Image: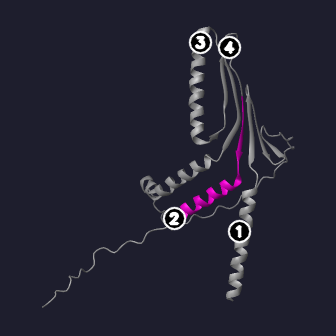
Amino acid sequence: MIVLTILSWVLVGIFSLILLILLLTLPAVRLHVSAINGDFKITAWYLCFFYRVYPMKVRPEKPAKLKKKPKAEPEEKKDEDKPPDKEKPSIAKLFKRYKAFGVKAIKILRQLSKRLVVYKISVKVKIGGQDAHQTALRYAKATSFTAILIQLFDRLVTLKKPGVEVLPDFLQEQNDYAISFRLRFRPIFGVIAGIQLLAAWISSKRHKKPRRKGGKKYEPAKSYQ
């Protein structure tokens, strides 16, 4: 019996090690995102396979079939002697209960977001307006907004050499933009984050046993000479 248990644990260890090696060697999932004057496209790549996420292919609609009217079912009698509904916990109790889990979850998700690599960033924007004054105001707002947005994304994810170009165009009234970037993420980091979240959730569900209050106090024995 002992030999079988040891053999089963050895097999489980070998299987988990093989699974971990497979996860570590899995290539990253890539997303190609582009937006050119309202034309928005997202394509997912894995190895040599790709899938168009947006816009999705429009399938031809099938002719609707005539549905038969359902027969009226007899009404069931309502049970008068129903147990009273339990009182829902207040928001303060829920916040106190899941505060520790929320703090851990935010920390894990922040670490996971830094594993998301954004590269080959190309942002080209031309700002136009009705006159030179309006174009200058729009250009100033666009440059400040772009700088704030890049700093925000740099804190959340890993950016690699963003190429940003915002220029004023005094010859047209409309704005033109062409934005494209790629995302890269390895599945192993998602698995690790999921295990950490599950462990944090289980630990938050455990209730500490209340300590006994009071109790007898014993005085130290007096020494008699």
Quick one: 90 or 217, which is closer to the camera?
217
Q: Which residue is mark 2?
A: 203
Q: Residues within 10 Å of mark 1 (few under 14, many from 20)?
A: few
How far separated are the C-alphas under marks 2 and 1? 23 Å
Residue located at (66% from left, 18% from top):
167
Q: Quadrant of the C terminus?
A: bottom left
Q: Which residue is mark 1?
A: 16
Tag nearer the camera, 3 or 4:
4
How far separated are the C-alphas under marks 3 and 2? 57 Å
Say what amino acid the circle numbered 3 marks: Gln
Q: Which residue is mark 3?
A: 134
First in sequence: mark 3 vs mark 1: 1
First in sequence: mark 2 vs mark 1: 1
How far separated are the C-alphas under marks 3 and 1? 63 Å
Residue 77 spot, x, y in % from top left: 60, 64
Q: Residue furthest front?
A: 225
The label number, if any, that marks residue 2 in the structure image = none
How far separated are the C-alphas under marks 3 and 4? 11 Å
Q: Are marks 3 and 4 in contact (CB under 8 Å)?
A: no
Tag nearer the camera, 2 or 4:
4
The label number, if any, that marks residue 169 in the structure image = 4
Residue 216 spot, x, y in % from top left: 25, 80
Residue 186 appears in the rendering:
yes
